[in-house]
Amino acid sequence: MTFHLSAEERVARAQADFRIGLPVLLRAGEARLLALAAETLTADRLAELRSLGGEIDVVVTARRAETLRARAYDGDIARIAVPADVAAAWLRATADPASDLKMPMKGPYATRRGGDAALARVAVHLAKQAHLLPAAVTLVGGAGLEARALEAGLCQLSVADVARAQPEAMALEPVADARVPLEVSEAGRVHVFRPRNGGEEHYAVEIGTPDRRQPVLSRLHSACFTGDLIGSLKCDCGPQLRAALAQIGAEGAGVLLYLNQEGRGIGLANKMRAYSLQDQGFDTVEANHRIGFEDDERDFRIGAEILKRMGFSAVRLMTNNPRKVSMMEGAGVAVAERVPLRVGENPHNRGYLAVKAAKSGHLL
Ligand SMILES: Nc1nc2c(ncn2[C@@H]2O[C@H](COP(=O)(O)OP(=O)(O)OP(=O)(O)O)[C@@H](O)[C@H]2O)c(=O)[nH]1
Ligand SMILES: [Zn+2]
């Protein structure tokens, strides 16, 4: 009897190692690549990589490459060659937009073309999933790479593992639920759902006893520490959260889903990076792109799966976001009605709301 690690378990370990700053060995057929997150790379670790020989790249998304004026020959990513004489700070500055303004002409960058970029793509995917800067440092062709990785006990992952690993939404389990009387209704109940991959837990706030045979009044809310908790005026999240709860409470039945996808799925640290860029004049969408993210990295299937696990198959969805409607329907939960939720506009978030309407299709 020996232990068998599933694809999900391997991927989850690799993500955790990226956050710690440990390298992971990626495999596809005969190809081998050692990968680390650019954000957690230290000078010592860079020296370790260099002692192996081989080619070191910093891999960024095509979005970040555009800001850096580097050519993205691999479509969605760019493999930037790291010169032999640069320090870890050079790699960091390539990945991190914090110094873009101070050094507007970073580079010039030499980007690799040809060869297989599949492993480099997996490396960037892991960094994103770990909520770090979406960039990886990679090494190919190092002497005795695989043997050394094994000897050091590094995590190993194949491209097939990443493809096989189920999305978080498909592997959510209910963990616990309990009665929580709320200001808007004394008949509140909080349910906690946990993904099998050890990722963030997500919550459902059930109010009253909604009829499972009818479309349930529902809000799909994404975590916003700044808006939900400390009263930030930069967005409309706090007022939306409270208005949705109030409306569900007034009707006497419904479900508020609270998904821990802070910052449209990029995590709070990256959201603060985006806010710094917004203070330099970029809008909410441009800021995400300059870090290297898409406009919206959320997976709303998580919300649909939670509703299905709770016995619902149709919703009256409180949202202005058409993507939430289409992703809900794509995941098998019918949207019988879209209930608009326009509250909380103020002078600070007026521009943000206008950009969401103009660029992300939000309905007014
Ligand atoms: N990356 C990024 N995230 C932001 C910014 N402002 C707010 N957010 C996040 O955006 C999300 C807002 O989520 P929702 O309340 O579901 O809003 P929505 O997608 O606009 O859709 P509806 O409110 O349903 O119309 C939260 O996760 C916030 O943390 C920003 O400038 N950049
Ligand atoms: Zn917000």
Image: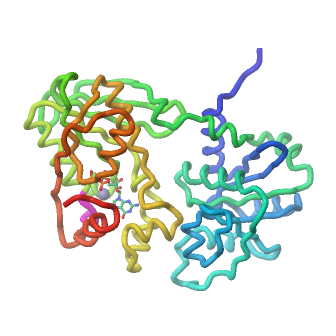
Q: Main secondary structure of the magenta part?
A: loop
Question: Which image quarter holds the C terminus?
Answer: bottom left
Residue 226 in the image: state x and y as whole percent. Answer: 32, 58
Indicate the quadrant where residue 263 lies: bottom left
177 lies left or right of 70: left
* In this picture, residue 120 sits left or right of residue 263: right
Identify the residue at image location x=23%, y=35%: 315
In this view, the residue farthest toward the top is: 1
Between 52 and 340, the residue placed more toward the observer is: 340
Q: Nearer the viewer, residue 185 or 127?
A: 127
Residue positioned 79% across, 39% down in the render: 153
Range shown magenta = 232-236
- Left or right of 35? Residue 340 is left
Residue occupying image coordinates x 60% and y 35% = 165
Numbered marks: total = 0
Residue 234, given in percent of the width and then of the height, sits at 28, 66
In the rendered view, would you say 241 is above or below 360?
above
Q: Residue at x 73, y 22 (%)?
A: 3
